Structures are given as structure tokens and as C-alpha cells.
Image (tube, rainbow, N blue to C red):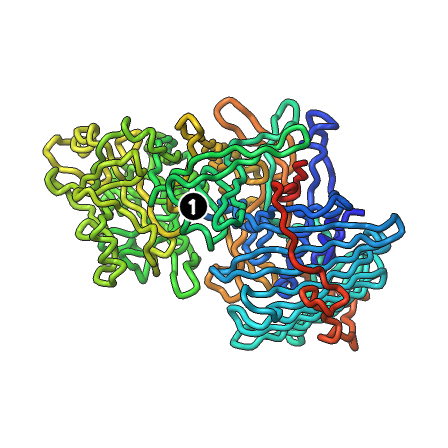
Amino acid sequence: MNIGNAFRKLGVAAIAAFPILVAAAPSATSSYVTDVQNSYVQDQTSEGIRQVNMISCFMSAMKPSAMVNQGNYLALVDETKCDANRDSASNSGSSNSGSNASQYVTATLNSSRASNSDPMIVKTWVDESDNGNQQTIYVHTSASVAPSAGNPYGQFRLDYCGVAQGTSACMVNGYIDASSSGLSYYETESGGGGGPRTIAMTLNASGITSGSGRMSIAQSGGGGSADYTFAYNSQYFRRSDGTADQCFSRDASDAGTGFSVWRYGLYDATDGSRITRNSGFPIEYTSGGTAYHGYLGYWGLWLPQEVMSSVTTGSTVKKVDYNGGAATATSYTLVKGSGKLTKYTKGTKTLAEIDQIRFMFFASANSGPAGLSPYNQGTSYEAYWDNTNKRFAITGKQSCGGSGCNMVSFTEVATANSYWSTNYAFGLFGWSQALGGEVFVATGALANDGSNAASLAVTYRTQDLVYPSQYAGIGNLGCIADCPTANGIAALVAGSAQTPFGTTAGNYAPTAAGSLVTYTLDATTGNLQDGTTAAVSAASASLTGQFQWGIRSGKLFPASQAGVVDSADGAADNSYRVSSVDALNIYYVWETGPNAWNQFSAAKDSGGNFVTFDAPLQVNFTVPSGAAYGSYAGTTIVMQYNGFGDLFGIPGKCVSMITNDPVSCDTQNARYVPEFIVPFDQTAGKVTNGSTTYLVKWLDREIRLAKKNVSVCSGAGLNLPSGIGLPTSAGLKDPSNASSDVYIGVKPVVTDAPRVIHGEVKY
């Protein structure tokens, strides 16, 4: 039996089952056809079972059913792919490098079965770090019946306990008990962001077509509590929290049904094979006699937080290679810088070609366009070019608070082209997810009637990591605006400055050559050095506020290109402007900070050569026509492909967790999700890179049910249950306690290389 599949059917994720139609593909046996697609329902009650979903993902990724009676083994699970708390947009929608870095959790397992008539017993020890706090999660699983149409959960019992390092009590303790009559789930957590919390759920179901249940969430410390009852039949799903009675359609083809995709695969358009990228590899690092498992790739180095500080340039890491059913380790020398340098290479489109594509811009003008009130200089606004009416429209602004930044939508404000050509005469700088990142529009030349949109230049930039071995070919660098220095970073950390940029913060005024901030590149350490030869480093700094995710410089240009920058404004007069840097085909940005993705990390082989990784593959996607694609229908966006399962760059929107309807992102209970999905279709679901075409297939899909009037559910005979009891703490067991009948014992020591890496059995 496949215990992973059983776990993936847990909880509300199983309240809707939809057939998956496989379209014709290059070959009936190709990966494009045979790769499995999974659909999960997202509902307001899903918040209560996020731990269940996390456990189900972990168990599936550790493949215990494939390792029965093969002894103790290690498995690596990519936590970023099992984060039940993430927004659906985090994978397919985000282009932040940190969000795409793999973060592996190490688990030790033993899967056994005495005979074909006995249950499969899985003992699992998961080592996890939560904000530097180490804990071991003990899990005991007994599974005896596989899932089926009449018994969607199979028959299994799973007990778990999370124990913090140096303690013996369960910080979190729970169980899942499934049988042919349904499923019970109970969990108690002693602390967390919202205080102590208890969740209990009963799901009565004998099949996938109908059932009912109840869920109760009790949380102190301002976390909120709720009690839901729900029911479903073959057509509808209904739930109530005692105040709001909601009805939803279970028909995936309903026009109101929403979809988000967590993972996509990219395939060869001719033979349907998977497109792979050399984006990184798992590593082993030994410290204090303990072997730690991590990942080294294009986005940097990841290791458990407790050992990251001990990893320095010169440390030895081992890459594990799997060949011929065995694992061999090769040693590499680590090179670790305090920051990283990224190269930005120019691409071009016309203003007409980015019709309807949203972008963000930083308001630097002294006053806003007519109709935009209030206007706040320094705020980021959302806008797009309307090629039909030949004008820009502003549709929202960014609002930041203690919980982060959100886009606040408002009724769009149509603007006069003269506003942009006058107030942004040197050009409009922006950022667009749909165009792959930074954008520059030559608004100074925009005609009042917009008639030159088909020829007006819009530039965007693709990104590549720079290795220290490439520094010699770059030479010294100059900076005009937002130029960090060692002293500037020290002042920021000390609280005596608000930015690390000194007088160059937000500097858009002409700058003389003698006032440029200059840097040198140290190929030995990988660091950027300021004019005092001090490293521009915040690797060990404690950063907060707008810099908590790291410090990024302004645009850096090679000293050899100073003449081009000087004359780009029309005169070689020893006057440098930020906008003039965009005249260069290539410029650079330095990033530094305490996070792994803020720092350069790479490995050298025994010959002293860097092991290089593939940058994300830039692909173009022509969005199909139709209401499902909103304002992006018919446009072309730029997406990035890190490797199999990791295609991202779709613009986002917000929906209500309660109703699934689109809402402003500053609305309570709003979730950020991708604006649309790439369809699984050989015609509409394809992307291109130059003359090469690839096919796209969604792998993990979220379904948000279409909301209906409650009378629709009532008319279909679907009523809410009453009198459903809930599981209690009396059913709790502790697999970390030697006196418990589910005790799994002390974690065994396994020195072999991991045998499973996020669902893939290596040997």
C-alpha cells in the first residue's frame, strides 16, 4: 500500500474529488503524460488542519512504503514544498530568490512489516529548527488498509509529539485515526505565535461523494477560535461557523471555481521528457562529529540554522552522488562571501507590447496626477499601460504595516500622458513580476496622445549570479544612488541612521565624478569593498524593518563604462544620473544580509575550479484569452524555471479565505494567490525561450470552490449536521515516552547517505 497517498487524502483536502483528464501528449509513455497530477481543496477550515497537511506531505516525501524492511534510513524533505502555512503563490508566483531556495529537513525512519497480513509500522524522527529552536518530532504510524473509493482514507493511526531540545514534554502532541467510517484528528500545542491552541475534528465519510463533520479550533492569546460544521454531497459543500452559512459548488468546471498551482513541470515539446536544470545538489557537512544535511545551489547555501555560523570559506562539504544503486561522496571546498553580486542584462519591448501588464513604480514626483488623492511621494503604486486608450492607469498602492506589505486596490485612475513625460522626463523605473523583475519606461519621449507606444522603448532585465572568478573581467564599480558602505551599515545597525546609504539614499540628482561612490571586488573573499577597502557586509548584522530581508545596493556600473553613463543624458559633462545607467546593456547590484540568500556560497573542486549552477531559465508565456486570465489575457509575460516542479513568475491577486471571492489585499482574511494558472494543454500551455518551445504541466493544484447561495445547497437536500462529537485529549499518545504503547525509541544513528530526497528513492 502507498501510505503517502493515504496521508494526502486527509481532512478537508478530500472533501472534493475531481477527475483529472490527461490530454494527448508527444508519447503515451512520456513524462508529460505519466507524471501524476494532484488536486487539493482549499477552504477556510484548512487553516485548522495545516499540521495534518504538513504531516501528510512529509510522510509522502519520505517514501516509507518503498523502504519496508530495509532498515533505518535517512530522508531529506524540502520544507519549502511542504509549508502548509505558505500562500499558494509562494512557488508559482514569487520571484524572490530567498523564497525559491530549498530548505531541507532531515528525518530518520524505519519502516517495517512482519507479514503481508500485518500492518506497516513506520517510526520517524524528524529534526527541525524553528527560529533557531531545535526540536525532534517523534512519529509512530500503523497502516493496515490502503485507500479505496469506498474507504478514501484507508485504515491507519498516526501519533506524533514534538519535543524541544533539552526538554521531555511535548510542545505539540496529536493523533490522526482513520477507518472506513471516517477520520478523527486531535492536536494540542503549548505555544506559538498565537498562544496555546487545540484543534479537534471529526469527519464522517464512507466515500468521496458524501459526508459530514465538525471542526473546533480553540486558541488563546488573540489567535481566535472557531467551531465549524460542514457537509457535502456529489454536487455541493456547505459549512457554517455558527454565524456565516456558506454554500459552494464542487463542480471544477464552474466558472466561479478558482485554481492555484503550487508546482509545475517543464517538458520537451517533441518527446515529452522532463526538462532538468543543474540548479544545485544536496550536501553533507560535519561539525562536532555530527553530520548535517543541506543544499548548495544557484540561490546559495542552506544548512540547519544551528551550524550555519560555523560554515566559513575553506570548510569541507560533501556532495553525494547516486550511481548504480549506491551512494558515493565527493569532497568540495566551500567559498562563502558576505554578500553576492548579481548581473542584470537588458531585454527590450515596446510600450504597446506590455499592454495591460501590471508593474510597481516608486513615486518620486513632487505631486501626483489628477484624480489621485491622496498622493504620497515615496509610496509604491501599481499601474499598467492601456494600449486601447493610449494612457497609463494607476490601480493601487502598497501599504506596509507590522504584518508586512500588501497591495491596496482602488478604482483605477486614468492619467494624462503629459504628466509622465513632464514629471518622469528621465524615465519611469518600476518592477514587474510578469516581466521578470526591473522595468524602465522611456516616458520622457511619450507623446501626449500616446501614438508612439508601438515604438517607445521599455527595458527589462534578466539576472545572473556573478562568481568571484569573474570579478577580474568586471573591474572597479561606481555607484550614484543607494550606495551602501561599511560605515553606513554600522550606522544602520547602531540606530544612528535609517538607511545604510548615507547621503546617496534616494539620490536622483546629477552627481559629479568626484562624488561617485566607488568599489573594488575581492576575488579571494568574494566581497565588495568600499573606498576604505572595508567589506560592505551585513552578514552578521541584526537587521529590522525594511532591511530585515537584506540590503541591496543601487545600480553599480563598471568604471570602464563611466563615459557611456556620463553621456547618456545627452552631454558628456562629468554629470552622472541614475537613469543613465539604464543605457548600459549590463549593470550590477550588490546584496548582503544575514540570510543565506543574501550571501554568495559556492564550492570548488579538487582542482580549485568553481562548481557552477544554471541560472533560472527565462521563458515567455503568452496568456490565453478568456475571463479566467483577467486583464492579462492575450499578453506575454516572462517566467523563470529553476528546475523540475519550480516554474514561477505569475502575477498575483488576493482572495477571501471565507468566500473565495477576489478582495483587496488589505482586507481581513485575505490570501495572496496567483492571478491565473498555465493550463495543461499542448497549444495554450506552452512557453518559449528563443526558438525553443516547452510544454507545461501543473503537478500540484489548489481548488477554491465556487460560492453559491445557501438556498442552492438547501434545495439539493444538503443540510448541516448536528450533534457531532469531537475527539478529545483522552486519545493522545506520546511516541517519545518509553511507557507508551507507541514508543518508537531513541533515534538511531545512521551514517549512510540519505536514501530518499523529497520523494525520490536514490538507492
Farthest residue toward the right? 117
Identity of the residue drawn at 39% across and 64% down: 401
Give the quarter of the figure containing the C terminus. top right
Vertical comparison of 288 with 698: above or below: below
In the rendered image, residue 626, in percent from the top left (x then y), is placed at 59, 42
Q: Nearer the viewer, residue 292 or 30?
A: 292
Vertical comparison of 632 with 187: above or below: above
Instruction: Classify mark 1: residues with Cα within 10 Å, few (<14), some (14-19) or many (20+).
Output: many
Identity of the residue drawn at 50% across and 62% down: 133
Q: Quadrant of residue 183?
A: bottom right
Camera sees residue 728: yes
Q: For numbered disc 1, what is the local secondary structure?
A: loop
- Left or right side of 574 for 23: right
Q: Which residue is mark 1?
A: 358
Vertical comparison of 719 with 132: above or below: below
In the rendered image, residue 642, in percent from the top left (x then y), is placed at 51, 37
Q: Nearer the viewer, residue 681 or 753?
A: 753
In the rendered image, residue 393, in percent from the top left (x then y), is placed at 38, 48
Identity of the residue drawn at 37% across and 57% down: 548
In the rendered image, residue 454, in percent from the top left (x then y), is placed at 37, 31
Please, what is the three-letter code of the amino acid marked with disc 1? Arg
Camera sees residue 716: no
Q: Nearer the viewer, residue 627 or 304?
A: 304
